[in-house]
Image: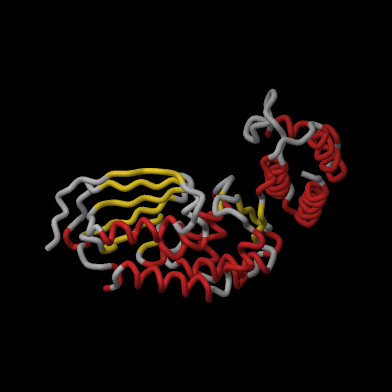
């Protein structure tokens, strides 16, 4: 058994994706044991555990195994921060090589998998970064989408959260990366998922007035004024707080839901109200 008693610790920041295999192979050649982290953000942070030069375990939210390394390569985790410490001692149950493969074999398998991935090109053409926010076009959701075990989890996460990133949908919904990419790709192609990277840019105040005018056409001005006044705090539109597309989209959903609850017999009218607000928002240049 090789001597791993010498302590090793390092950290850095890189703009080169190939720093990932370089560091893994470096630690493998030194027969090092410890924990290696690569991080792009709080939600996109991978941990890899090594024992005597072999990868024994990987973690990235719900992903594990080779899926983690494959995902890291696909989304440029080498363009971020990394650190290693040999102080970490994992559980002995994990001291088996990942997939019974040496690091070089794992890296070759990952490269081949990414080259052959049927979803990578389309997803990358719409989302440049793993931390790009993703939003939902509920009008395009089908019955089949809700019945699909992976798609339904993605839809639920998007409906329950105000801001969800691509990273969260690919790594923190389902334990299989390829299955998550399949579901994401199909929802993207059908128009259910939208790149909402520009939805947090500040907009002129006049857009809130325009939204009020749209609501007025389906109710009246006093009701529209009261509705927006009541919702300002919950929508973070008080004082100097900026108006954004994301907040306007939230107004659209709240208006449709609340007016339907108030007057369910006019449900079609409120659907048209929501569509009118959405059409106006989609016309805004950001």
In front: 81, or 208? Answer: 81
What colour scheme governs how the chains and residues are painted in the rendered image of this protein?
Answer: secondary structure
| Residue at 41%, 62% in the rendered image | 69
- State how many labels appear: 0
**Is residue 60 placed above or below 211 in the rendered structure?**
below
User: Taking 154 as reference, is 20 left or right?
Assistant: left
- Residue at the limit of the structure toward the left, as seen here: 1
User: Taking 95 as reference, is 160 left or right?
Assistant: right
In front: 32, or 42? Answer: 32
Q: Measured from the top left, where is residue 228 in percent x and y?
A: 74, 34
**Is residue 212 placed above or below 14 in the rendered structure?**
above
User: Taking 58 as reference, is 266 left or right?
Assistant: right
Q: Measured from the top left, where is residue 108 in percent x and y?
A: 41, 72
User: Taking 156 as reference, is 276 left or right?
Assistant: right
| Residue at 58%, 53% in the rendered image | 129
| Residue at 61%, 68% in the rendered image | 121
**Image quadrant for the C terminus?**
top right
**Image quadrant for the N terminus?**
bottom left
Q: Measured from the top left, where is residue 256 in percent x and y?
A: 72, 49
Q: Measured from the top left, where is residue 34 in percent x and y?
A: 25, 52
- Residue at the limit of the structure toward the top, as seen here: 239
């Amino acid at each position: 058994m090789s001597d791993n008693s010498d302590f090793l610790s390092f950290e850095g920041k890189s703009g080169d994706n190939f720093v990932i295999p370089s560091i893994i192979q470096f630690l493998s050649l030194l027969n090092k044991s410890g924990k290696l982290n690569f991080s792009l953000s709080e939600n996109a942070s991978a941990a890899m555990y090594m024992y005597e030069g072999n990868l024994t375990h990987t973690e990235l939210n719900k992903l594990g195994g080779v899926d983690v390394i494959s995902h890291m390569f696909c989304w440029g985790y080498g363009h971020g921060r990394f650190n290693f410490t040999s102080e970490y001692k994992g559980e002995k149950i994990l001291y088996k090589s990942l997939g019974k493969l040496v690091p070089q074999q794992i890296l070759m398998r990952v490269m081949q998998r990414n080259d052959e991935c049927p979803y990578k090109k389309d997803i990358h053409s719409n989302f440049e970064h793993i931390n790009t926010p993703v939003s939902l076009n509920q009008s395009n959701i089908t019955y089949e989408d809700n019945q699909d075990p992976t798609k339904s989890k993605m839809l639920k996460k998007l409906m329950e959260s105000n801001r969800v990133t691509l990273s969260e949908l690919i790594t923190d919904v389902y334990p299989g990366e390829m299955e998550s990419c399949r579901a994401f790709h199909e929802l993207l192609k059908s128009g259910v998922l939208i790149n909402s990277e520009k939805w947090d840019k500040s907009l002129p105040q006049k857009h809130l007035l325009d939204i009020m005018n749209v609501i007025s056409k389906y109710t009246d001005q006093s009701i529209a004024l009261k509705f927006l006044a009541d919702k300002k705090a919950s929508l973070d539109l008080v004082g100097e707080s900026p108006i954004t597309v994301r907040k306007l989209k939230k107004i659209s959903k709240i208006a449709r839901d609340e007016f339907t609850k108030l007057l369910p017999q006019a449900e079609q009218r409120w659907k048209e109200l929501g569509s009118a607000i959405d059409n106006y928002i989609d016309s805004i240049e950001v």
